[in-house]
Image (tube, rainbow, N blue to C red):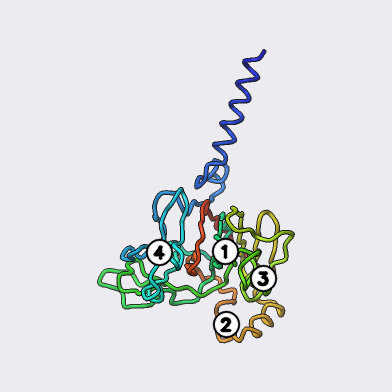
Amino acid sequence: MVRPILFLAVFAVVLTAAESTPNQLSPEEAATGWVLLFDGKTFDGWVLRPSDAPPLWVIEDGCLHVIPQGAIPESTLRQRRSDLLTRETFRDFDFRFEWRAAPAANSGVKYRLMGGWGRKVEPRAGEAETGFLTDLSALRTISSTGIEYQISDDEHEKDALSTPLHAAGAVYEYVPAKKSHPAVALRWHEARILVRGTHFEHWLDGEIVASGEFDSSEFRAALAATKRENFPRLFKPYPDHETPIALQHHRTEVWFRNLKVLRLEPK
């Protein structure tokens, strides 16, 4: 009777380990339509400046790793700080990922980007006219402006300490994060961005920390308070407004893994 029990115990350990392997979809997720955005080994599926030297992003221990400001000469950082964008574009989606931030880190994930992300140049012969460029040799930086899921060390980052509008999980500048615990440096956190039409939800470690409607009076008041009302397209429910999802390079060290997305039918 000992051997079957021992076998079951070993099997349970193996199963648990398999389920916890990062950067993989479960059979159920794959059958449902989830798409893995990062395989843990390559930049396939992402827009990256391959000419950057030293690199601004590296793959390390199965993670997308932002090289921090201190490791890059300031003279070149101003010119080459580059966000990392998905090659595919998304409108209504459920995006889940894990992130870990260095002490006092400040970064974010952006979506529903404004048009013209990246420094726009004329397409080369044979290159399709798209909202962003796949050949980035002519760009000095890849920048993105849009709705931002804030990433921060809530215990040490000065902006996060000053206002919940800049705390982890907030809709940066517009909707504060209301949560049961702070995001802690050097700890993996589970994040989720759900957006469908004008509705949005930001999740952190299993709880909704910010939600609402982009076309609500509350959100428009928050927009007006930041004096960014000259960017109205950013917050309209355009049914055809698809953009990449962007991981921000904000000069501080952050790691990402387990990035996966499910496209949703519009409302």
Disc 2 and disc 3 in contact, CB within 8 angstroms = no
Q: Tell me the element at label 1.
A: loop
Distance of label 2 from label 1 (alpha carbons) = 19 Å
Is residue 200 found left or right of 76 in the rendered image? Answer: right
Marked residue nearer the N-terminal end (3 or 4): 4
Marked residue nearer the N-terminal end (2 or 3): 3
In this view, 187 is above or below 238: above
Marked residue nearer the N-terminal end (1 or 4): 4
Distance of label 3 from label 1 (alpha carbons) = 31 Å
> Callout 1, which amino acid?
Asp
Distance of label 2 from label 3 (alpha carbons) = 29 Å
Q: Which mark is residue 232?
A: 2
Q: Position of residue 174 (x, y in %)?
A: 65, 76
> Callout 4, which amino acid?
Leu
Disc 2 and disc 1 in contact, CB within 8 angstroms = no
Q: Residues within 10 Å of mark 2 (few under 14, many from 20)?
A: few
Q: Nearer the viewer, residue 146 or 22?
A: 22
Q: Tell me the element at label 2.
A: helix
Q: Residues within 10 Å of mark 4 (few under 14, many from 20)?
A: many
Q: Residue furthest left?
A: 125
Q: Which residue is mark 4?
A: 56
Q: Which residue is mark 3?
A: 161
Quadrant in the picture for the C terminus: bottom right
Q: Position of residue 39 (x, y in %)?
A: 44, 49
Q: Which residue is mark 1?
A: 92
Marked residue nearer the N-terminal end (3 or 1): 1
Q: Nearer the viewer, residue 11 or 36?
A: 11
Is residue 8 found left or right of 53 in the rendered image? Answer: right
